[in-house]
Amino acid sequence: MHHLYAHRGLPHTFLRNPPGIMEILASADALRFLQGMWDVVQAELPEPDRVASLGLGIEVFSIEADAHAAVVTMPTPKREFEAFFVGLVARLEGDEAFARVFSLVLTSPPGADPEAAMLEWNAKGQHEFVEQRADVDPGAFVDAIEKVLGNSGAG
């Protein structure tokens, strides 16, 4: 469930319609929208694979000129490669418009001092490692996203 939502559902939905999804995520209906997506994904799974959405949250950050990052906080990861956060990032206007999706995933057994890596996802559900080690903190995650955007010229 965790993997399907963070690594398939959110990236696919966002990258199909960045302006519409970013508008929803910046609104008072953001958490209701995310919970609804959770329920839809979960309904497709057998009972043993279902997970409570406890901890699901959203925070929107302004980054660079005219770009925004909606950071979705996921329920606490219980297995390797489950996500702590998913960052949906876009600049929707101008010559340098873009939309990208990042996640911060658990790369060690769960515990008191988890290790995490940052991935970037595309609409086909494929990913690449962006940073092998990253801090598990929403602000640090946004800082890492800004660094990647600055290095790639998309941001």
Image (cartoon, rainbow, N blue to C red):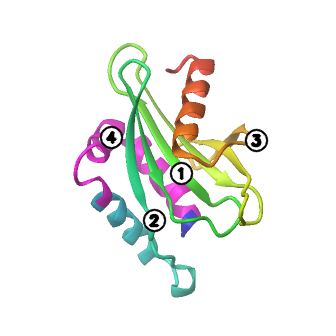
Farthest-out residue, left:
28
- Disc 3: CA contacts within 10 A as few (<14), some (14-19) or many (>=20): few
* Mark in front: 4 vs 2: 2
Q: Which amino acid type corresponds to the residue marked 1 in the rendered image?
A: Phe
* Mark in front: 2 vs 3: 2
Q: Which amino acid type corresponds to the residue marked 2 in the rendered image?
A: Gly
Task: State which region is magenta.
Answer: 3-31
Q: Distance between the residues labelled 1 and 4?
A: 16 Å
* Mark in front: 1 vs 4: 1
**Quarter assignment of residue 40:** bottom left
* Residue that carries the numbered disc 2 in the rendered image: 55
Pick the front one: 73 or 128: 73
**Quarter assignment of residue 127:** top right
* Residue that carries the numbered disc 3 in the rendered image: 132
Marks 2 and 3, the one that precedes in the sequence: 2
- Disc 4: CA contacts within 10 A as few (<14), some (14-19) or many (>=20): many
The picture places residue 10, in percent across and down from the top left corner, at: 46, 52
* Residue that carries the numbered disc 4 in the rendered image: 22
Q: Which mark is residue 85?
A: 1
Pick the front one: 138 or 67: 138
Q: Secondary structure under badge 4?
A: helix
Residue contact at pointers 3 and 1, CB within 8 angstroms: no
Q: Which amino acid type corresponds to the residue marked 4 in the rendered image?
A: Met
Marks 1 and 2, the one that precedes in the sequence: 2
* Mark in front: 4 vs 3: 3
Marks 4 and 2, the one that precedes in the sequence: 4
